[in-house]
Image: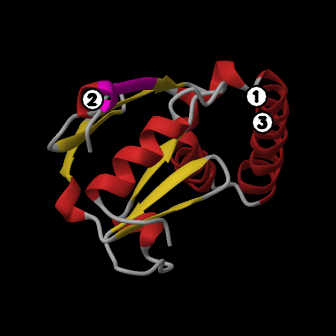
């Protein structure tokens, strides 16, 4: 591509906690309700506080990416995703295809979309204003291939 200097490096930050305040309030209210419900069920009724602790821990761990800012960086040879607590570095050759999903783009390790993509692939969440979308699509088309 003739305008490589315009594409690289591509950087942006996604932080759903502050980007989507209405969803955040709903999520926090749901978490409070779930905590209360699990407390009444596991501790009050069953007298097993360990179930409550494990249940809340698993729930919060699953939602952890929502509560921390994620920084994305695309250079000419690799993708870096910084989750504040860990950094993931991948080469473009690690991915076989890519496709749009609800909040961004999913990079798949397979040649076609599979159900394992959530576990083996890499999800790229757009920022709220999606300024990086067009440049990202150009980079992915150049490095991985056309969208599936």
The secondary element bearing badge 2 is classed as loop
Q: Earlier in the sequence, mark 1 or mark 2?
A: 2
**Do the residues bearing badges 1 and 3 touch, measured as CB atoms within 8 Å?**
yes
**Do the residues bearing badges 3 and 2 touch, measured as CB atoms within 8 Å?**
no
Q: Nearer the viewer, mark 1 or mark 2?
A: 2
The extreme top residue here reads 18
Q: Using the image as rendered, state which of residue 75 and residue 56 is in the foreground.
A: 75
For disc 1, the marked residue is: 24
For disc 2, the marked residue is: 8
The secondary element bearing badge 3 is classed as helix
Q: Nearer the viewer, mark 3 or mark 2?
A: 2
Q: Using the image as rendered, state which of residue 132 and residue 41 is in the foreground.
A: 132
Q: How many marks?
A: 3
- Mark 3 to mark 2: distance in Å? 36 Å
User: In the rendered view, would you say 127 is above or below 39?
Assistant: above
Image-quadrant location for residue 117 = bottom left
Which span is picked out in magenta?
A: 6-12
Q: Using the image as rendered, state which of residue 31 and residue 42 is in the foreground.
A: 31
Q: Position of residue 129 (x, y in %)?
A: 66, 24
User: In the rendered view, would you say 125 is above or below 68?
Assistant: below
For disc 3, the marked residue is: 27
Q: Residue 113 colored magenta?
A: no
The secondary element bearing badge 1 is classed as helix
Q: Position of residue 23 (x, y in %)?
A: 80, 33
Kindly identify the residue that appears in the image at 27 percent across and 29 percent down: 8
Q: Position of residue 46 (x, y in %)?
A: 74, 60
């Amino acid at each position: 591509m003739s305008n490589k200097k315009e594409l690289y490096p591509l950087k942006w930050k996604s932080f759903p906690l502050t980007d989507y305040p209405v969803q955040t309030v709903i999520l926090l209210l749901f978490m409070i309700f779930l905590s209360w419900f699990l407390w009444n069920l596991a501790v009050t009724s069953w007298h097993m506080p360990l179930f409550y602790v494990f249940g809340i821990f698993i729930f919060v761990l699953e939602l952890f990416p929502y509560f921390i800012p994620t920084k994305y960086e695309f250079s000419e040879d690799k993708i870096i995703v910084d989750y504040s607590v860990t950094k993931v570095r991948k080469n473009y050759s690690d991915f076989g295809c890519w496709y749009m999903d609800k909040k961004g783009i999913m990079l798949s390790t397979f040649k076609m979309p599979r159900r394992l993509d959530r576990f083996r692939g890499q999800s790229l969440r757009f920022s709220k204003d999606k300024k990086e979308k067009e440049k990202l699509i150009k980079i992915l088309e150049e490095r991985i291939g056309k969208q599936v």
